[in-house]
Image (cartoon, rainbow, N blue to C red):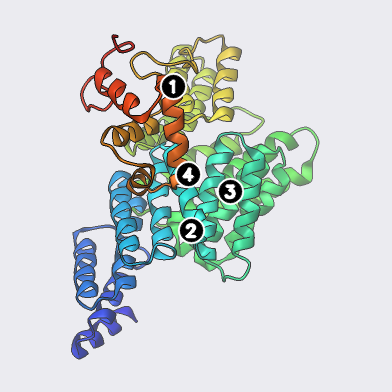
C-alpha cells in the first residue's frame, strides 16, 4: 500500500504524501537498516521540509532513530533523536512528536548503561503531558531501570501506569510486548514464577509477535527465565507448575525457530535465549554440555554492542557454568568483569547475585567504589560533570535544561549538588574550581583539590 501511495504521490506532485510513504517503506517490518533505507529517509525529510509538513519531517527522524537503535547503533540513535527534539521544539511540536523523540533518546541511553541521564530525559518528557502511547513507552523504560535497580515498588507503579495509559489504545507490539516483559520480570523479582509464566505466555498466541522480532526476542528471554524459575521452585513441591513451565518452554523453542533475526541486537537476544532456555531445561539437574560456551557467546555479543547490563547478566551465568565445570579461575575472571558493570549501573539485585556466587565459591571480587569523593573529580557523577561544563560556559538553568533535554528543576538540582560537592559558594566559584582542576576539559584531569 505504501509503495502504491508513493507512486501516486509522485504522479500528482504531492510532496507531503510522498515523504510519508517513503518513511513507511523504509520502516517496513523485517527491513534491515541499510544505505537504501537511510537514503529514503533523507529524501523524505527533504520533501517534508519543502512541503512544510513538519509532523512528517519529525516522523522521519523518529523512524531513523528507531531503526538505528534496533540495529544496535545506540550512540547514533541518541544523536539523531536529540536533534529531533530540538527541531520539535522549534516547530512548536514538543508535546507529541517531541516526547516520542525523547523516548528515542532515552532508550539508547539505557542500552548504553547511562541510566541516570536517561532518567532525566524521561522525567522532562513526562512533565510535558505526552499522549497516552508515548507516556506508556516512557513509563516502561522507567520501569525497566527501576526493576534492574531493585526498586520493585517503583517498577510496579510504572507498569500499572503504563497499562492504564494503554487502556483506550489498541494492541501495539512496541508497547504491549515491553509491558509483558516488564511485568514478567517484576513477578520473577517478587518470587511469583507461576504468575510470570502466565504473563510471558499470553502474547505468544498473537500472530503479531512473529512479525515483530525486535520486541519479541526480549520476551522470549524473559519467558525462558520464568520457566527456569518455575522449574527450580517446583522441583520438590508443585508438579502442575513444572508441567506448565515445560509446556511454555516448548512453545518458546518453537517460536524461536520461526523468528527472524535482524541485526546484532536480535542476535544477542537469540544467543541469550539459547543459553537461558538450556539453563531452564536443565533446572534441578546437571547444567549440560556447552553451557559456559553459550553464556560466553552472549556476553561477547552484548559487550560488542556496549550494553553493560545484559553483558553483566551473561557473565554471571557464565561464571556459574564455569564453577559447575570446576573452572574456578574462569569463574573468578567472569565475576571480576561483571561486578564493576553492575556497580556502575547501581543494579543492586544483579550485584548481590554476583557477590553471592563469589562468596559461595570463595572467590574475591574487585572492591566496590565508595560513595565518597573520587580523587580529582570531587565525587561528581558523569552527568554532574556534564552540567558543570555548561555552568562554566555561563549557561543558566534553562539553557542547561534545553541543552541536556531535562527540566529546569532537574538542572537546578544538579547545580545545587555540584556546589555542595565542590564546597563552592556560587556558580562562578564552581566554574573557577572546575577550570583549575581540569573538570571541564576533555583531556586528563588534575588530581586532588585546587591549590589555594
Against 318, residue 120 (above or below) is below
Cα–Cα span, label 2 and label 1: 31 Å
Position of residue 21 in the picture relative to residue 358 (left or right): left
Label 1: which secondary element = helix
Q: Is residue 249 visible?
A: no
Residue to which mark 2 is pinned: 128
Dots 4, 1 in contact, CB < 8 A? no
Observer-nearest of 233 and 129: 129
Residue highlighted by disc 1: 421
Depth order, front residue of 118/92: 92
Which badge, 4 or 3, is on the more N-terminal residue? 3
The residue labelled by disc 4 is 409
Residue that mark 3 sits on: 182
Which residue appears at 30% of the width and 23% of the height?
A: 434
Question: Viewed as shown, does residue 374 lie left or right of 152?
Answer: left
Q: Disc 2 vs disc 1: which is toward the camera?
A: 1
Upstream in the sequence, badge 2 or badge 1? 2
In whole angstroms, how far apart are the C-alphas of marks 4 and 1?
19 Å
Q: Residue at image x 39%, y 31%?
A: 384
Q: Residues within 10 Å of mark 2 (few under 14, many from 20)?
A: some
Q: Residue at x 33, y 24 (%)?
A: 429
**Can the viewer see residue 299?**
yes
Q: Are marks 2 and 1 in contact (CB under 8 Å)?
A: no
**Viewer-nearest of discs 3 and 1:** 1
Amino acid at each position: 500500500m505504501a509503495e502504491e501511495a508513493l507512486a501516486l504521490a509522485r504522479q500528482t506532485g504531492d510532496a507531503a504524501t510522498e515523504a510519508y510513504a517513503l518513511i513507511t517503506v523504509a520502516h517496513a517490518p523485517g527491513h534491515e537498516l541499510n544505505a537504501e533505507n537511510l537514503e529514503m529517509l533523507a529524501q523524505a525529510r527533504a520533501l517534508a521540509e519543502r512541503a512544510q509538513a513538519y509532523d512528517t519531517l519529525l516522523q522521519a527522524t523518529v523512524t531513523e532513530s528507531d531503526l538505528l537503535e534496533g540495529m544496535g547503533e545506540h550512540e547514533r540513535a541518541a544523536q539523531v533523536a536529540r536533534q529531533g527534539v530540538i527541531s520539535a521544539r522549534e516547530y512548536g511540536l514538543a508535546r507529541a512528536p517531541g516526547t516520542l523523540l525523547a523516548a528515542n533518546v532515552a532508550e539508547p541511553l539505557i542500552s548504553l548503561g547511562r541510566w541516570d541521564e536517561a532518567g532525566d530525559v524521561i522525567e522532562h518528557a513526562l512533565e510535558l503531558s505526552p499522549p497516552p502511547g508515548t507516556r506508556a513507552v516512557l513509563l516502561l523504560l522507567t520501569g525497566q531501570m527501576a526493576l534492574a535497580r531493585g526498586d520493585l515498588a517503583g517498577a510496579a507503579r510504572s507498569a500499572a501506569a503504563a497499562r492504564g495509559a494503554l487502556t483506550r489504545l489498541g494492541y501495539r507490539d512496541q508497547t504491549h510486548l515491553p509491558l509483558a516483559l516488564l511485568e514478567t520480570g517484576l513477578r520473577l523479582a517478587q518470587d511469583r514464577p507461576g504468575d510470570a509464566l502466565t504473563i510471558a505466555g499470553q502474547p505468544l498466541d498473537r500472530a503479531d509477535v512473529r512479525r515483530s522480532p525486535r520486541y519479541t526476542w526480549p520476551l522470549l528471554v524473559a519467558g525462558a527465565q520464568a520457566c527456569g524459575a518455575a522449574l527450580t521452585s517446583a522441583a520438590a513441591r508443585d508438579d502442575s507448575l513444572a508441567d506448565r513451565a515445560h509446556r511454555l518452554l516448548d512453545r518458546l523453542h518453537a517460536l524461536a525457530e520461526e523468528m527472524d533475526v535482524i541485526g546484532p541486537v536480535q542476535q544477542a537476544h537469540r544467543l541469550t535465549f539459547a543459553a537461558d532456555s538450556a539453563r531452564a531445561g536443565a533446572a534441578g539437574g546437571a547444567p549440560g554440555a556447552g553451557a559456559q560456551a553459550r553464556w560466553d557467546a552472549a556476553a561477547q555479543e552484548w559487550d560488542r554492542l556496549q550494553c553493560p547490563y545484559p553483558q553483566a547478566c551473561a557473565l554471571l551465568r557464565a561464571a556459574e557454568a564455569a564453577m559447575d565445570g570446576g573452572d574456578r579461575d574462569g569463574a573468578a575472571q567472569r565475576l571480576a568483569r561483571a561486578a564493576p558493570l553492575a556497580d556502575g549501573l547501581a543494579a543492586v539485585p544483579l550485584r548481590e547475585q554476583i557477590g553471592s556466587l563469589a562468596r559461595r565459591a570463595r572467590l574475591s571480587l574487585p572492591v566496590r567504589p565508595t560513595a565518597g569523593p573520587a580523587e580529582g573529580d570531587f565525587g561528581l557523577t558523569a552527568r554532574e560533570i556534564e552540567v558543570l561544563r555548561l555552568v562554566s560556559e555561563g549557561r543558566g538553568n534553562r539553557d542547561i535544561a534545553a541543552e541536556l533535554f531535562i527540566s529546569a528543576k532537574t538542572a537546578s538540582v544538579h547545580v545545587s549538588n555540584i556546589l555542595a560537592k565542590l564546597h563552592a559558594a556560587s556558580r562562578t566559584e564552581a566554574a573557577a574550581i572546575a577550570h583549575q582542576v581540569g573538570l571541564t576539559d576533555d583531556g586528563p584531569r588534575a588530581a586532588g583539590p585546587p591549590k589555594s
